[in-house]
């Protein structure tokens, strides 16, 4: 009788423990929203989905009682489409976090919807520094880079090297406008002068008339305030016009490793650029990139895709620590806990939502310097986290006291 009671008690305890564990499980749904078919597909696209899933696996979320589903959609670089998907995801599909979102006009719209729905938005792909400035939100984190950091890195370096007169070729939407604005401020603060600018449609195809205006300006530096295929097409067409051979320099203000790969070293060599991540920086970046390449057709990750991976890791750590997916609770934990991952190293999320980490100034190698398909950059300088991003007090964010 005693033995039977003991067995019954043990079974009851096991049942209660199992029930408690089941109740403690958390279901999280992550939505990767980006360009999957257009000008930014290579730098984000399916690669960002691969990165998000790798983060879930590497975190061993299932072993920690966190069931994670990753879904994706194509916003086609259109704010109305991006907004519609974001609303459906939040209202009908149970998405807790939206990730990536290149194209600043889409990102700004998604940020407002996320605030309205009290969810979480972690941006890796968009550049406009307004996301943590006048348009900041308590529900948004801007993880990887922004226009201020790009301007500070590439713009500052080129002025120091003697490029003190500039002409901008600018994508005509929020990102291009912000990049031109932030770089102009850096150039003028350093004693340089902006001679003019021209804005091209987004996305663009034929840059010839815009490049001729830039060439005739006589500016020492032509700042390309665009990204993706717009940047690579502009650089290719500049080569046809002999702009660099004529003594003017091109500043790719947002250039990705996929852009340089597409251009080839013969065309891109000597280009100076600022990035938050490069696959061949250290053992941690190389190990991740090798695994990423095995899942993504041999391509190395861009900084946007790396940012998706790192930000998902940080989010899941906060969910595990709080045993919650409540937006306010998780965001508070994300901001109070320093980030640390193999791709970006140590960092933090400020009150304005800006994630702070080192940035890097790179120069594209010559064909003779390269030892392999993806051996594309050499490091010129490391920009410390404290200097890489706009000072907290200067952004005009209402969350900053």
Image (cartoon, rainbow, N blue to C red):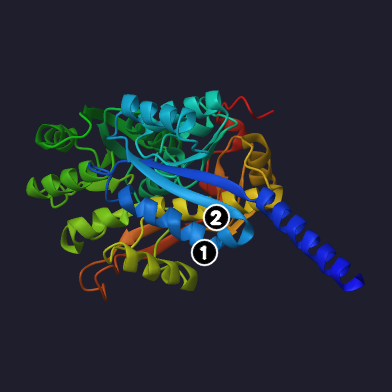
Cα–Cα gap, marks 1 and 2:
8 Å
Task: Locate the N terminus by quadrant.
Answer: bottom right
Which residue occupies the foreground of this view, 10 or 342? Answer: 10
Q: Position of residue 234 (x, y in %)?
A: 17, 43
Is any part of residue 175 visible from this angle? Answer: yes
Q: Position of residue 376 (x, y in %)?
A: 29, 65
Residue occupying the point 26% across, 72% down: 370
Residue occupying the point 29% across, 63% down: 299
Residue occupying the point 37% across, 31% down: 85
Indicate whether 364 appears above or below 231.
below
Which residue occupies the foreground of this view, 54 or 125? Answer: 54
Q: Which residue is mark 2?
A: 313
Which residue occupies the foreground of this view, 207 or 184? Answer: 207
Q: Is 125 placed left or right of 231 in the picture?
A: right
Which residue occupies the foreground of this view, 254 or 168? Answer: 254
SS category of the residue bearing label 2:
helix
Q: Which residue is mark 1?
A: 58
Image disc number at residue 79: none
């Amino acid at each position: 009788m005693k033995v039977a009671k003991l067995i019954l008690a043990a079974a009851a305890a096991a049942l209660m423990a199992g029930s408690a564990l089941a109740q403690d499980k958390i279901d999280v749904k992550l939505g990767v929203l980006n360009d999957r078919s257009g000008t930014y597909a290579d730098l984000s696209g399916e690669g960002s989905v691969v990165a998000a899933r790798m983060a879930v696996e590497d975190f061993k979320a299932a072993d920690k009682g966190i069931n994670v589903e990753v879904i994706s959609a194509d916003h086609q670089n259109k704010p109305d489409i991006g907004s519609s998907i974001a609303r459906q995801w939040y209202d009908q599909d149970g998405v807790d976090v939206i990730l990536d979102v290149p194209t600043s006009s889409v990102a700004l719209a998604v940020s407002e919807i996320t605030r309205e729905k009290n969810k979480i938005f972690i941006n890796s792909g968009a550049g406009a520094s307004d996301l943590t400035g006048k348009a900041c939100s308590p529900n948004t984190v801007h993880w990887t880079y922004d226009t201020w950091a790009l301007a500070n890195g590439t713009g500052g370096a080129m002025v120091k090297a003697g490029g003190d007169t500039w002409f901008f070729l600018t994508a005509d939407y929020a990102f291009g406008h912000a990049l031109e604005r932030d770089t102009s401020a850096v150039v003028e603060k350093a004693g340089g002068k902006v001679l003019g600018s021209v804005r091209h449609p987004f996305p663009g195809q034929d840059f010839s008339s815009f490049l001729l205006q830039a060439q005739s300006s006589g500016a020492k530096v032509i700042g390309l305030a665009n990204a993706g295929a717009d940047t690579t097409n502009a650089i290719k067409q500049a080569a046809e016009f002999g702009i660099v051979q004529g003594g003017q320099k091109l500043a790719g203000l947002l250039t990705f490793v996929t852009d340089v790969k597409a251009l080839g070293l013969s065309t891109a060599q000597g280009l100076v650029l600022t990035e938050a991540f490069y696959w061949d920086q250290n053992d941690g970046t190389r190990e991740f990139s090798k695994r990423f390449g095995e899942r993504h057709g041999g391509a190395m990750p861009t900084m946007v895709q790396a940012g998706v991976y790192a930000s998902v890791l940080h989010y899941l750590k906060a969910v595990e620590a709080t045993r919650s997916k409540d937006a306010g609770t998780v965001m508070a934990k994300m901001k109070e806990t320093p980030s640390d991952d193999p791709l970006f190293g140590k960092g933090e999320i400020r009150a304005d939502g800006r994630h702070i980490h080192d940035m890097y100034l790179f120069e594209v190698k010559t064909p003779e310097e390269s030892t392999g398909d993806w051996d594309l950059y050499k490091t010129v300088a490391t920009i410390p986290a404290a200097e890489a991003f706009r000072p907290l007090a200067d952004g005009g964010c209402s969350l900053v006291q």
